[in-house]
Each structure stands twice: as structure tokens, then as C-alpha cells.
Amino acid sequence: MAVTDRRDPATKQIVLFKNMTTGPIAIMTTAAGAPINRHDTVTLNKRLIFNEFFMDTLTHIVRERIPERVVHAKAGGAFGYFEVTHDITDICKADLFSKIGKRTRIAARFSPAGTDRGGLDTAREARGFAVKFYTNDGNLDFVGFNTPMYAYKDPLLFTTFTRAEKRNPVTNLLDPNMLWDFILSRPETFHFFLIILCDRGIPDGYRHMPGFSIHTYQVANKHGKSYFVRFHFLTDQGIKNLKTDEARRISGLDPDYAIRDLYNAIANGNFPSWSVYIQVLTEEDVKNAGFDVFDVTLILPLDKYPLRPVGKMVLNKNPKNYFADIELLAFCPGNLVKGILGAPDKVFEARRLNYRDAQYYRLGGNFHQIPVNCPRHKAFPYNRDGQPPVHGNMGGIPNYYPNSFNGPVPFDEENAAELIQIYQDEPDNYQQARELYMNEFSPEERQRIAENILITLVSVARPLQERAVKFFEFIHPDLSNKVLRGLQANNTH
């Protein structure tokens, strides 16, 4: 049982519901609306198949689970708004940025990347940071991370990465041999894993966690001129993280620690917020950067491309029903709006396919018509039929385009920009990881990084340990020596 106190609305939710009602809220019915007689709530010595309450409830419960997300399966989430605080119309014509003070409704979902749906909120791993903006021009989805970079540059590695960090197909256990084999085979991943292995690897709940777009987006202003930006969501609560021992202690008391913390904060009126910034590059900046600014395994240096303030994200509303509001919340990076063209890198291109395919598999071909995924205005696609929900199924509107019978037509956009095409080199494997280790980590944090590496590395096969020691030499000899001494002290083989 989780440790609770008097300011714990999450634990008291069902009690609060009772206190808000004066008695049973309605006569109980079947799903078809037929009222249920009290004698039908007992089945002993009666014919089961003729009891519609029994048939209704028993056949439904085995259908109450939908496919779990392969990654980001467990999550907390909430609703709120984004408010523009600074004018960026000089670089982006998107309606949600059109004027200072403009508010746009949002839904946010925060999630450990590899944890199963019933796993721990305090695992050492990256977190997803996804925000859906319900704009006047349709939904805009940012699907980011709490790390400013990602693990790989070639999207073909998604399946390898995912399988390596998941369970061994024979033992059904997490296998450090698999994960370290992947890391050591793709050196560009270690820039990402340095963040996970350092003190930032276990956020102290979602409220104290930053978010990053990881992609460099192309945006355009009303004149059709393009700029390139990375989004930063910096927590106004201050960044807080958990040390390894503290996270282990909490996980034994409350595996849902981060979800509970977010829910209780909002329920108690302590609405979390994030200040939103962008890094801005011109086309000339892109050409003269000296590195691939679209490489998701790299950061854009802040001293070269400083943060420019944009707005504030506030979460002030908890889900009314977790399944309907958070589990069915579906993100697609291809959900873009006028003025935001997406990112030209291959990881973004692959995510446009991968996320959409995942939603079709989990939720069906009409997942956009699930209430939490609906745009704020009525949509007019030429899609029909299929797995519910279909709502009015577009009534008598023609179901093909083009047509001569007054069906929906496309609009003409003035000064429309097109997403650029780029050529991407092989990833830069070590430079930024070396700079991160040398320039941003204190001596104490460097020691803790080595200790966190050893937690899993001591149990892997000796050839992988030897490769790891050589690998860390390219990052920094200090890291390699710390790991080597740790392995020798453990003398595991």
C-alpha cells in the first residue's frame, strides 16, 4: 500500500465521489439500457445464459484490455492550456502563436520509455514528454523526451533498440547483456545514455521534469520564409531527480509515485507549469553550423543558439477517467498545422509512420474520432466506415474526392513553404558525449555515473565488459578507469 496523508486526493477519490452524491446515482442497467432487476444479481440455481446482466458483464470483462503500447506503456497525464507570452510571429505563422495572451487547450502524457504498464515510475530510463495542442487549425502533437537528445540517428534501429531494452524472449527477464550489446554496437547512443545514467536519470515525478522536442522543426512565417527550431519545456517547479537508493526505497512503497504526485498536485490546486522556449536557426545557420543540426543524437549548443521565450504550459485538470482520457490519448507526429512543417530527419519521418500504425493497431482506423483525440472543430475527412467510433459517419456527404456534389474541398495557402530535404552523414559518436562528461558533471556525479553503470554491467558477459571499458576510453579516460576499477573490485567472473 502506498503511504498517504490527508492531502492525498488520489487515494480518497472514491470517497470524494460518495461525498458529492446523496445516494445511488441511477438505476443499474445493461449496456443496452435495460434496467436490472435485483433478483438478476444472483445466479445460483438459475440459468446463466438467460441472465442478461451475467452475460453483459462477463463477456465484457475479457474485452476490457486493449493492446499495450510497445514503448511508453505506463503513463500519467493531465489537461490544461498553453498561453503565448512572447511574440514569435516573425518566424512562425501557426495560429496558436498568433498573439500574446492567446490560450490553446492541451493534453499532456508523461511516460517511462521502456517500462511495462504495471511497472515502476522510478525506473532509471528516459521519459516521454508528449503534448497535444487542440488548435483552431487542427491538432498539433509534440512527441518529445525529458532528454534533449535521442538514442539513434537511423530509424531502422528502432526495433533493435526496443527489443534490446525489453525482456529476453526465453527468460522473460530484462537482460543487461542485450542492452549493453546494443549500446556498444552503436556508440552514438551513449550521449543519450549518459543522461540516463547520471543524476538526471530518475526524475522526481513528472512535475519536476523538463521536456524537449529532440527534433529540429522547420517552421515558416506568413511570407513563406523558413526557420528551424527546437522546443524546450522547462519546468517552473525546478528540476529535481532521485538518487538510486532513494528511487529503490520509493519503488517499494509506491510503484505509481509519479502518477500519484501529478494527480495530487493538480487536485490540490498546485497546478504544475512549464516555460516554453525555442532555439532558432536560419537557413544560413543550418548551412554554416559545422555539424548536422537535424541529428537527434546531438544537442544544439545553447551558447551558439540561445533560448527564445515563447509561452507557458499549465496543467490544471486531472482526467475524469484514466482509460478514456489518457490510455486512449493517441499522438501522431504527423499531426501538424499551418506554419509548422515537421522535421526533415529520418527519425521524424519514420515516427510519422510508426505512431500512426501503432494507433491503428491499438485503437482502430477511427482513433481520431475518440473524444480525447478529436480536434476542437468539426473535421471533414473523406474517411468512412470501419471500427467504431464513427459518430454520424459524415452523413450524406460524398465519400470520394474529387467530386461534383459539394463535398469538402482543399484550401489555397498563400506563401506556402515546403519541408526541405537533407542529406545526413553517419552520426558523430563521441564529441558531445565527451563534452557533457567533462564540462557539465561534477566529480561526485561522475562517480555516481560509474556506479550506475556498474549496477548492470557487472552482470554481463566478460567480452561485453571489456568492450565497454574500451568504449568509455573514447568518452573520457576517467570514466573508463572508474568502470574498470569497479569491475575488478566486483570480480564477477
Image (tube, helix red, strand yellow):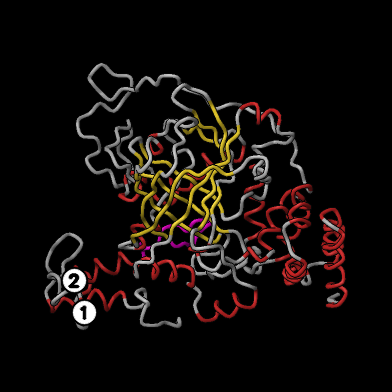
Q: Which residue is mark 2?
A: 51
* Residue at image point 87% right, 62% down: 466
* Residue at image point 62% right, 66% down: 124
Q: Is residue 118 above or below residue 379?
A: below
- Find residue 43 and name its label: 1
Q: Is residue 354 above or below residue 459?
A: above
Can residue 258 be seen in the rendering of this structure?
Answer: yes
Q: Is residue 52 magenta?
A: no
Can residue 366 be seen in the rendering of this structure?
Answer: no
Q: In this image, 381 relative to 464: left or right?
A: left
Q: Secondary structure at mark 2?
A: loop
Q: Which residues are magenta?
A: 62-76
Q: Quadrant of the C terminus?
A: bottom right
Question: Is tag 1's residue or tag 2's residue first in the polypeptide sequence?
Answer: 1
Compare residues 60 and 88 and report the one nearer the observer. Answer: 88
* Three-letter code, disc 1: Thr
Q: In this image, 193 relative to 89: left or right?
A: right
Provide residue 342's location: percent of width, then percent of height.
Answer: 52, 35
* Three-letter code, disc 2: Asn
Q: Is residue 226 above or below residue 276?
A: above
